[in-house]
Amino acid sequence: MIKLINSKWFQHPVFWILSIYAIGNYFSISSVFKFIDVFYALLFHVPLFFLVYFNLRVLIPRFLDQGKYLLYFLSIPLLLLATYVIHELTFEVMFPLLDSEFYMVSFTEWQVLLSIFLIYLILTTLIKLSKSWYTLQQVEKEKLSLELNSLKTQINPHFLFNSLNSIYSQALAKSDQTSETVLELSNLLRYMLYEVEEDKVPLIKEVEMLENYIELQKLRLEEGSKVGFTIEGDLDRVVIAPLLLFPLVENAFKHGMKDDSKHAFIEIKLKVDTGISFSIRNKLGQIDDMEKGKYGGIGLENVKRRLELIYPKSHEFEILKTKSEFRVNLTLI
């Protein structure tokens, strides 16, 4: 039903039926709407058909849509003149050729005609522009939705590779933790693949996912490595965009645990108060030639873009780098 209503094959006939009824009533010589009023309205609409569709099919596509505004406005007086001529020819030439029992003449003053023509011209132009704007908004919305979905699914394949290697090592050593590790990886992948389709998810689920990820990463770290995750505040009833924090944590493990792992550290803090505050501090790993000037890589760019799209005026994102540390501070207001 909605598809039918949005179709031009429905909208145009409805527009013209209402228009014929309105014009017929406007020029009716009696208080009762008669067939002669409909007949007169139909004749009156001959030039209106020309005006509307010449504007919709020729002037707007060739000039207005192309940004040639001056040419469009210069063509309007010519269109109005042509419409007036067609109006006169309709009543002076075409109607006398019809086999009709009625006698009609164009008795409307040119000022009134010009006003009606302008109303139809402006009305149809505004309707066309509003539909074009709505279509553009829908396209932009779909484009943003696709972009967000793409950003949400950018999972680092190295993480999967390292996790599977860790599980393989545990299996060879016949570790009792193997089954628990497989379960943690399974829960993490399930969340990433199936539970992030919503625009917002409970913060507590996001935290559980991060905790699973941290536990998996700890499997490959040396004993001296320090990883801390502290949480303050009530996580209940707080929602957040899914996988927004994950790239920040992933980035910290990717670069903070590169070398000298015995002295490596990652400190993660999450605080929920009037908003959400999330910060990460990690040891600045050795940067190779490919990463010079791009420390943080696609993960941080992912977060920046999603913040622009989802929290355009309600976030603060800060990146600080010293000789020995890398810090990221995110606040969602």
Image: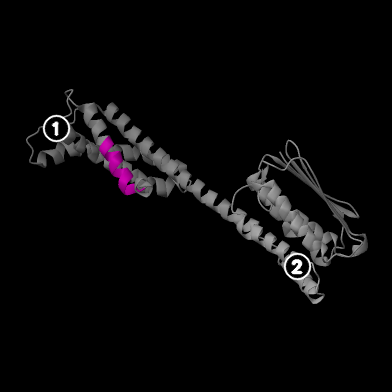
Residue at the image position 43 percent from the left and 46 percent from the top: 63
**The residue tagged with tag 1: helix, strand or loop?**
helix
CA gap, disc 1 to disc 2?
83 Å
Position of residue 162 measured from the top left corner of the image (x, y, whole percent): 77, 68
**The residue tagged with tag 2: helix, strand or loop?**
helix
What's the residue type where badge 2 is placed? Ser
Q: Read off the residue under disc 2.
A: 163
**Dot 2: few (<14), some (14–19), or many (≥20) neighbours within 10 Å?**
many
User: Within the image, what quadrant is residue 84 found in?
Assistant: top left
Number of numbered labels in the structure image: 2
In the rendered structure, the answer to whether residue 14 lies left or right of residue 289 reads left
Residue 36's tag is 1
Residue 106 sits inside the magenta stretch = no
Which residue is more in the foreground, 197 or 47?
197
Residue at the image position 70 percent from the left and 51 percent from the top: 206
Predominant secondary structure, magenta span: helix
What's the residue type where badge 1 is placed? Ile
Which region of the structure is painted magenta?
A: 7-18
Which residue is more in the foreground, 49 or 92?
49
Position of residue 86 measured from the top left corner of the image (x, y, whole percent): 23, 40
